[in-house]
Image: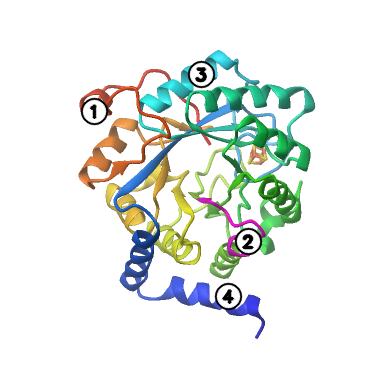
Amino acid sequence: MTTEHSLRQRIRDCYEQPFFDLITQAHQLHVAHHPKNEVQLATLSNIKSGLCPEDCSYCPQSARYNTGIDTWQLPSEDEIRQQVQEAKANGSSRFCMGAAWRTPPKKDFSKVLDLVRVVVNEGMEACVTLGMIDAEQAHGLKEAGLTAYNHNIDTAPSHYKDVITTRTIDDRLETLNHVGSAGLQICCGGILGLGETLEQRMEFIETLCQMEHPPASVPINCLVPVEGTPLADTKPVDPFELVRTIATVRLFLPKARVRLSAGRLSLSDEAQALCFYAGANSMFSGEKLLTTANNELSDDMVLIDKLNLSIQQPTCPLPREISLERLSEPVAGSVVAV
Ligand code: SF4
């Protein structure tokens, strides 16, 4: 039996054990490595929407699918500054910017570096997701003050070509190596519900564990089927499978932040609570995740309060106290996110 097989089998044994045994073990490891009862809020801004040449079969931003989304190009520094200040006032400590590119065009890359500097100057952790980048671009982002680069492997290597044909998993891993070698944190996870088998889901977790530079944060998304994409009619992920996946990731990557990402809107409060118990300690806050709807901030604050969670503080002090009264009002504007 190869080491690889042993790791896969251990992941599967862990995932398939009785549910309460699994989440109890994951919770114990979680509190051994992370502050108890704490959640990080991250805000995601869509800085360049749509017209992407890639064919990711889950994504409404691909130019190949007719999904009717709004498209736009990069915002100004002032627009981003305003979004960052609003995100920070609403409790986010990380500001992520996503652009629908296969790889960032030269003419736009220096503008992105300026946007990263805006985020950093406002005292927030900065993260970007720009598609494939080379070593020089990774170093440029590091010099601009970027904290983390998001580049999801999406799914198991053996399922990759069924989901995306315009690049390979090796292309993905190459960018992740550039990011890690430049000293940037890696944010890397995937999407459940892309038609993968259980074994492929285990392979996806195994791939995360075997990355040359281990991910500092792992976004776990559930597919949000969008009309016009090839996966529009896909069956939703069972929330218990999501909880099992989060718990298993927590057990095999104990130090990583596990981020509850797309698909949270379809979860009940109780299912979200199980996710936090099983090891999720970060989530996206904001009305939209790039193009799909996300939970209302005021609902999130009520849930955070019910669960007695505290919000992880930004690296610099919040301008004012986060209060439930204020957050129960509708949030001004719409910060567009993953
Ligand atoms: S997921 Fe990213 S790379 Fe794939 S089509 Fe959407 S924007 Fe493009």
Q: Amino acid at mark 4?
A: Leu
Q: Return the residue at label 4.
A: 7
Q: Amino acid at mark 2?
A: Ala
Q: Name the image quarter holding residue 283.
A: top left
Residue 63 in percent (x, y) is at 70, 32
Q: Is residue 235 above or below residue 114?
A: below
Tell me how far mark 1 sits from mark 4, CA to CA: 45 Å
Tell me how far mark 1 sits from mark 3, CA to CA: 22 Å
Q: Earlier in the sequence, mark 2 or mark 3?
A: 3
Residue 245 in percent (x, y) is at 46, 61
CB of mark 1 within 8 Å of CB of mark 3? no
Tell me how far mark 2 sits from mark 4, CA to CA: 15 Å
Front one among 56 and 39: 39
Q: Return the residue at label 3.
A: 81
Q: Amino acid at mark 3?
A: Arg
Q: Earlier in the sequence, mark 1 or mark 4?
A: 4
Q: Amino acid at mark 1?
A: Ser
Q: Return the residue at label 1.
A: 323
Disc 4 or disc 3, which is closer to the eye?
Answer: 3
